[in-house]
Amino acid sequence: MWAPDSHRVDVAYERLGAHVTTPLEPLGDGTFGGWIGGIGAGTTYAFRLDGERLLPDPASRYQPNGVRGPSAIVDAREFAWTDANWRGRPLADLVFYELHVGTFSEAGTFAGLQSKLEYLRLLGVTAIELMPVAEFAGSRNWGYDGVFLFAPSHRYGHPDDLRRVVDAAHRLGIAVVVDVVYNHVGPDGACWSSYTPRYFNDRHQTPWGAAVNLDGDDAGRVRELLIENALHWIHEYHVDGLRLDATHQFFDTSEFHFLAELRRTVDESIVDRDVILIAEDERRQIRPILSRADGGFGLDAVWADDFHHEVRRLLAGDCDGYFRRHRGTAAAVAGAIERGGQFDADPDDLARSVICLQNHDQIGNRAFGERLHHQIDPAVYRAASTLLLCAPETPLLFMGQEWAASTPFRYFTDHEAELGRAVTEGRREEFAAFSAFQDPETRASIPDPQDERTFVCSRLRWAELADEDHRRVFRLYQALLALRRTHAALRSTARHSVTAAAIDDSTVALWRYASTGASDAMLIVVRLAGGGTVNVPLSPVQATGRWTTVFCTEDASFVEEPAPIRVELAATSVRVSFARPAAIVLRVPTV
């Protein structure tokens, strides 16, 4: 135990039905340690510093009674894995499905998630991304208020229940990525500062207070803890990657940046399978995904918001806050696809940009948690979905998107009363700068994060899949994912394998072709507003055969009353006539 400001550290535990306290020996470097025999998995324990109150273990593997209870020993070796032949999936194969364990299934548990894995396989996604599962205070939380980084929330089940999810996912060919939060700890139940304030560095401030100490005195201990946490998820839970929350809030002026150290350590630790590291970084810098040899951190990918922001401004008219920085035009949407986002340099591999129409932030940080399809016409939604899944970037779906779920996804918490009131007031004040919420009475109508109903209404209603309107959207997504999986031109992620352009103010065209050895090319024409006729040049595709339609959003499988798209081929162009917003995918042999 690292407790550099303490003179004495004891560990209290139960053995053979008796409460036992054993002092740990000072090791001379701010740590205390010792060996205790005769105990094992399931034993609960806590630490006492200088004779004061008992504290859980900051590196606890399980908190069976929540954040203020004792920690429990977990023996990860007891689980019988069946995925010995699993080697992960490369980034170019990934289609992410982001989900929140507590609201994804009716049960809201790891077991409930496991029961839906076969559904996800049939849908065609290849990776699930779990919003943070680390132990948090209260009965419900998005997960970004986690306080025990090593302990899956007891609200979702035992640690072995999460292992069962990963093992079962691997049997179905689905990778598992976990969202981890290293930029702060939650405000309720955290015990780091009780052991030592040196976990934080006052020289750097974040929206949550002093930054996690990555470059100050004793930063080595903190970095070691965080890297050990990453390795713990990869080794003890066999996860295939980590999504690193808000890396723009990692303040590190040291010569060897924490993210580069993390990448190196993971690579040294895992040599027989793919492990993906993804940054969330709002600075639009290319450095996180540059190789270490080129001065970067060597991460695999970064969440790139520009596609989402341009699409939402164009289709739903959002113009407050960060949407002001975006034009919301067809040309801007095409540019976001062709470059992967508005980075300070262009990535060569567009798979390194993870893009979406919806994610937990972009839905849940809206006042009422509306999804994109709640605000636009179904025909427009079908067209935008085609654009997302035919782009060369790595796509991310948010749970329920694939059937146009009726439920919102709202911000919810369950903090103790005083903190909860502050969260509720702060949530409503955040929207004071938005034009729609200038009136205090209107702000008061924003759902209370502390109200359990805010959480309950965010849970997916799986019975909706029995409704034919929802089934049509599901079939659309299933068909698009199959198309992406089976055509070489749509599998290529090299920047030079795509050209994107606005044909007019309402139409975006993508020319897709494989970088090497493929025998076909694809032309995707997406109409995002109204009807109309456009002439799309065949260049840069050098076609040698006949164009055929391989996908159309106006297929009877996807819409009750189709409005057919008319296609006329000419020597150098394709004339496409739309009755309403829609998308069509054409294929042509090139050799």
Image: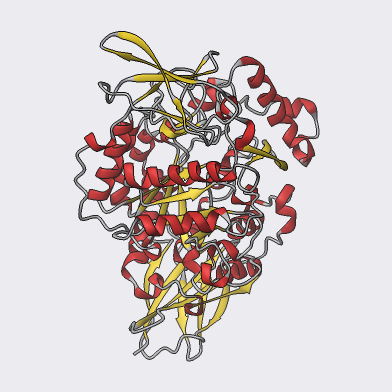
66 and 15: which is toward the camera? 15
- Which coloring applies here? secondary structure
Residue 257 on image: x %, y %: 58, 56
Q: How many numbered badges does the structure rendering display?
A: 0
Residue 45 on image: x %, y %: 39, 19
Residue 397 is at least partly visible in this image:
yes
Q: Is residue 264 above or below residue 66?
A: below
Residue 396 shown left or right of residue 334 in the figure: left
Residue 275 on image: x %, y %: 38, 56
Residue 162 occupies which quadrant of the picture? top left
255 and 284: which is toward the camera? 255
Residue 514 occupies which quadrant of the picture? bottom left
Residue 6 on image: x %, y %: 57, 24
Residue 507 occupies which quadrant of the picture? bottom right
Tell me which residue sits at (50%, 60%) in the image.
299
Residue 32 shown left or right of residue 309 in the figure: left
Tell me which residue sits at (66%, 68%) in the image.
344
Image quarter in which the C terminus is found: bottom left
Tell me which residue sits at (62%, 66%) in the image.
506
Residue 400 is at least partly visible in this image:
no
Q: Is residue 576 above or below residue 73?
A: below
Instruction: Single out the residue that lies furthest toward the top.
Output: 18
Q: Is residue 464 above or below residue 158?
A: below
410 and 31: which is toward the camera? 31
